[in-house]
Amino acid sequence: MLIDKLISRIIDLDSPIVVGLDPRLDKMPQYLKDKVFLVRGKTPESVARIFYRFNKAIIDNIYDIVPAVKPQIALYEQLGVAGIDCYIKTVSYAKSRGLLVIGDIKRGDIAATAEAYSRGHIGRLTIEDTIHKAFDEDFITVNPYMGYDSVSPYLDDCQKYGKGIFVLVKTSNKGSKDIQDLATADGLPIYRHVGNLVSEWGNGLIGEHGFSSVCAVVGATFPEEGAVLRQNMPHTFFLVPGYGAQGGTANDLKDMFNSDGLGIIVNSSRGITEAFHMEEYKSFGENNFAQAAREAVLDMRRDLLSVMR
């Protein structure tokens, strides 16, 4: 099971961290922008080239201390074809360095559309008698709010190709309360029902470590809700956004870990890739932005280990 590979990497590296590769042009090192824009002009193709160089440097400096990266596809899609090419190249390069890739795509549609999304991202594309991989992430994020038929194609491909999904259950944004916290007729909030469904969907995909490849997204910004979900979803692995820039702390996560220190992987995006802008890492300078990112990962790891044990 793919979830076993992820957990084994977390154990080997002592690092329950996934680095979000969410590049923003205004946060790129100025020297990198100047170099590309001077030669190629200020075009989407140039920005995609900047993003890839940036991502590649980050990956080269963190691949041996984290098990996974998580590129957010919207940051690439906004650039059109060049951005999608950058996303695919980023996924491929990360995997070549031994990292698992969680594609943050948050797709949620039904029938043939869901099948097409799944085929493109974690399944296979068949063109007459030839089979291709398109994006080829290891895991992807999925929005379940159109029900089982919006998720079932991904479940099929997880089973068939040994992939995994992270289903949105209780997200880290403040507005998640507007829908996810609404009480249903039995008094339970909607996110609890979604959590129960995710547990059910994952029953046939449980690996050697006792977790399913059908996983959940649970925000660090809602620690009480996360603790309840952990109690009710013992075989579900959590992807936890919201640490750092969104206000989540290591202490907020302690009840989402299992007693053995497993059960979650914590995302940090800006807090790592944009660390060179932060006061505590400014000594690295923009030329050493990737080394600053590495130091930020090591600091995050120390912070998380303090509550894991």
Image (tube, grey):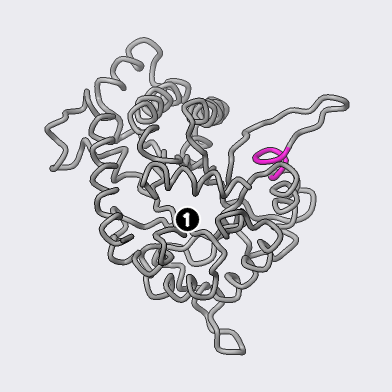
Residue at image position (45%, 73%) is 177
Residue at image position (41%, 56%) is 241
Quarter of the figure with the C terminus: bottom left
Residue 70 spot, x, y in % from top left: 47, 42
Residue at image position (41%, 62%) is 260
Left or right, residue 114 beside residue 66: right
**Which one is in front, 270 or 16?**
16
**Which one is in front, 123 or 42?**
123
Say what amino acid the circle numbered 1 marks: Leu
Residue at image position (35%, 48%) is 268
Q: Is residue 249 above or below residue 49?
A: below
Quadrant position of residue 139: top right
Residue 51 spot, x, y in % from top left: 41, 28
Instruction: Give the magenta part as a residue range.
Output: 118-123
Quadrant position of residue 24: top left
The secondary element bearing badge 1 is classed as strand
Judged from this view, the residue extending furthest toward the top is 39
Q: Which residue is mark 1?
A: 239
Q: Is residue 271 above or below residue 80?
A: below
Judged from this view, the residue extending furthest toward the bottom is 186
Q: Main secondary structure of the magenta part?
A: helix
Residue 33 spot, x, y in % from top left: 31, 22
Left or right, residue 308 beside residue 279: right
Residue 126 spot, x, y in % from top left: 81, 31
**Which one is in front, 9 or 133?**
9
Left or right, residue 49 beside residue 198: left
* Residue 122 inside the magenta-drawn segment: yes
User: Tag 1: Cα neighbours inside 10 Å, few (<14), some, or many (≥20)?
Assistant: many
Q: Is residue 100 above or below residue 142?
A: above
Count every numbered label the image shows and give the total.
Answer: 1
* Residue 303 inside the magenta-drawn segment: no
